[in-house]
Image: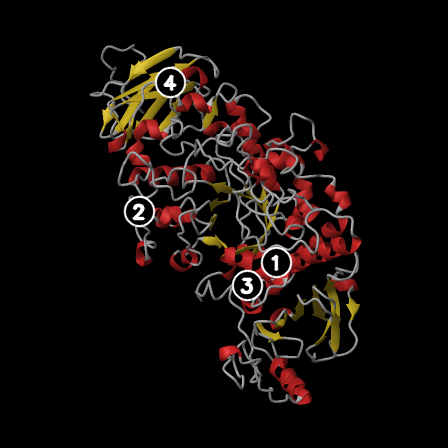
Amino acid sequence: MPQLISVPNLSTDVRIGQTFPLGATVYADGVNFCLFSKHAEKVTLLLFDRPNDPAPARTIELHRGQNRTFYYWHIFVEGLKAGQVYAYRVDGSHEPEKGHRFDPDKVLLDPYAKAIAGKDIYDRKAAMAPGDNCAQALRSVVVNTSVYDWEDDHAPRTPYAASIIYELHVGGFTRNPNSGLSESKRGTYAGLIEKIPYLKELGITAVELLPVHYFDPEDAQPGLTNYWGYSTISFFAPHQGYSAADDPLEVVDEFRDMVKALHKAGIEVILDVVFNHTAEGNENGPTLSFRGIDNRTYYILDEDKSSYSNYSGCGNSVKANHPVVGGLILDSLRYWVSEMHVDGFRFDLASVLVRDTKGVPLHGSEIATANIIWAIESDPILAGTKLIAEAWDAAGLYSVGKFVELADWFAEWNGPFRDDVRRFVKGDNGAVPALASRLLGSPDIYYRQDTDINRSINFVTCHDGFTLVDLVSYNEKHNEANGEKNRDGTNDNFSWNCGVEGETDDPKINQLRLRQIKNFLTILFFSQGTPMLLMGDPVGRTQQGNNNGYCQDNELSWFDWSGEETHSDETHFLRGIIALTQSLSLFLEESLLPVLNFALPRFPDENEGSDGDGQDGEELVYKPLPPVDEAALREMYLKATKDLPGSCVVWHGVKLAQPDWSYTSHTLAVTLFHPGAEEILHLIFNAYWEPLNFELPPLNDGLIWHRLVDTYLPTPLDFQEPAIASPVEGETYWVQPRSSVVLMAK
């Protein structure tokens, strides 16, 4: 209990308080408040009677001698309960050149606030301009998290190998009027509960929610809204804009209702968390919390301490490896797991977290020792949760592979998977070797033998970039609606419009686009690793070529529920391949699949094996390859695959066991074996613009190939369940242009 000593010159209902826990903690007879600020000279607690009151009903100045222990400011106020609205004013030196930006005119949020009030009165400009902003400021709310009834809730703990992740925007998922929900539930946690049956039917095992930490929707170009939510204000409070409730305490419970309902359906909840920067932006940004409480503690500053190191591309960078700030991050993660029951986190721009307090990147053993990444993955409360790094930052620190190499639990968004698969399906030269690596879990990136290969999170699309239908409909980005003259968003999309930019009525182009979409989905779900889908991709959601919809809170970004009917082909295909791959032991493997090699002549690379050296305009003339005895090869293949000791793969090209790794190749085939489960699959990918006749591997023991997938065929023949799959006659299979085929031995 907090100490009972009264503070001099204050009301008798005020005690000294204690330094732990940080934030506002409810006790039977009142609330303890604790705030860290090393450089503050004065702290004042503001207590409001109602969430939107223009001024506090009571102010309590903390006594520096009594209410400050080390750098922790603390006080206990008797009689307060959950639901109490509060905030701080913090005074100190205003010397930007020294990194101090104290401003007693600004009303500040508690960094540990579990709920936030004031969204209807909040004005970002008032927090940026000089003067008192109390009447337009957000406020913290005291929460007692121990009173919620979790019933029999338990974490699904789905292993990566059995996981299908669905990246989802809570607001955009149900905000469209055609969602079929009441207006009060659209775009809310409660609305998401109503759509759980859709996620179950699709085969989803985890939703990865775009930021739900309370964020600043006003952090966008004038007239637009920060829709994605990568503008965090509080690391503990759920965003009230996604709630059907007005009471901040009910917002917390509505979020927990959603988690509990998803768990009952066997679906995990992963939060996209933004610990790399905050909504306060650069030196011209608003003073909302951290800047006004202790700017030098919370942010990485440049050598000129009046400006911020901007490794996030959003104006500032959180000093994650400062002990106090790292403690805040850990406390936030622990809170969301222990009190809100979430199952994991995707760390936005996680490479910022592997920079030291001066912004210098940590290297090698430094990453695996005393720093915030090590602390997160070694924390017992977080043990067993999914920890996923977006392993790059906006300042060029590209760490894909490093989180898996140097940490034992972190997984990663596999950015090269996205880019290399796009390049292959598009038809780029030189894409086949990279595709082979991506199909087998990217062993060129994730080469540790003692770890789960499914820590590679594979994706073709995500919130940042083109949707799947736009990926096959646009050559260029079209972001004019964002108000930045199309300068925002990446230019490197590896997309192809199939002949016409944007929507078209040409049936041939639309058929090709549908086929390309199915090719992407086939590669995604028949690759080793954990697949992730983007919200709306199964039903043809388009952003009309906008590849940076962060500020588009409208039907451009929302899920279009009419797509369930208009895009039934994609839905049939996707549900089928998800159910199939989830049922196969081949895709539950946690180790790299070894490659069974054949001693065959390989196809020469672009400038290899020629009679001339290609200099001074000399035309390259390739030496002919030695002939292959086809009958002997098939006999050797049968013998080699008859009694395999374990799971493995064999690469092919158009010819059996002769993959074409050349620069101009557009084809690849692979046979996957799982002897223990008696599973044999043969995958064929033809990104060439002409049909090709692929030789099929021979089978032992009377087995024959059956067609599960052929993306060239119309629905329902494009996917057939194994029980009704069509047998394949002969020793070859004609694969049509830009098509994928999956065969199963039965």
The image shows residue 484, relative to residue 506, as above or below, that is above
| Badge 4 element | loop
The Cα atoms of the two marked residues, 3 and 2, are separated by: 32 Å
Dividing the image into 4 quarters, which one contains the N terminus?
top left
Q: Provide the secondary structure element on which disc 1 rests.
A: helix
Task: State the residue lying farthest toward the front.
Answer: 616
Disc 2 marks which residue? Answer: 356
Task: Kindly indicate the quadrant of the structure image that contains residue 170.
Answer: top right
Q: Counting residues from the N terminus, which is met first, the one under dot 1 or under dot 2?
A: 2
The answer to whether 294 is drawn above or below residue 521 in the figure is above
Dot 2: element:
loop
Q: Earlier in the sequence, mark 1 or mark 3?
A: 3
Judge whether residue 609 can be spotted in this image.
yes
Q: CA distance from mark 1 to mark 2?
A: 36 Å
Q: CA distance from mark 4 to mark 2?
A: 42 Å
> Label 4 is placed on what type of residue?
Asp
Residue to which mark 4 is pinned: 29
Q: Residues within 10 Å of mark 1 (few under 14, many from 20)?
A: many
Write down the residue under mark 1. 524
The crowding category of the residue bearing disc 4, from other C-alpha atoms within 10 Å (few below 14, some 14 to 19, many at least 20), is few
Callout 3: SS: helix
Q: Which comes sooner in the sequence, label 4 or label 2?
A: 4
Q: Quadrant of residue 486?
A: top right
Tell me which label, 3 or 4, sits earlier in the chain: 4
Query: Spatial distance from mark 1 to mark 3, Cα to Cα?
Result: 9 Å
From this view, report whether residue 172 is shown above or below residue 743: above
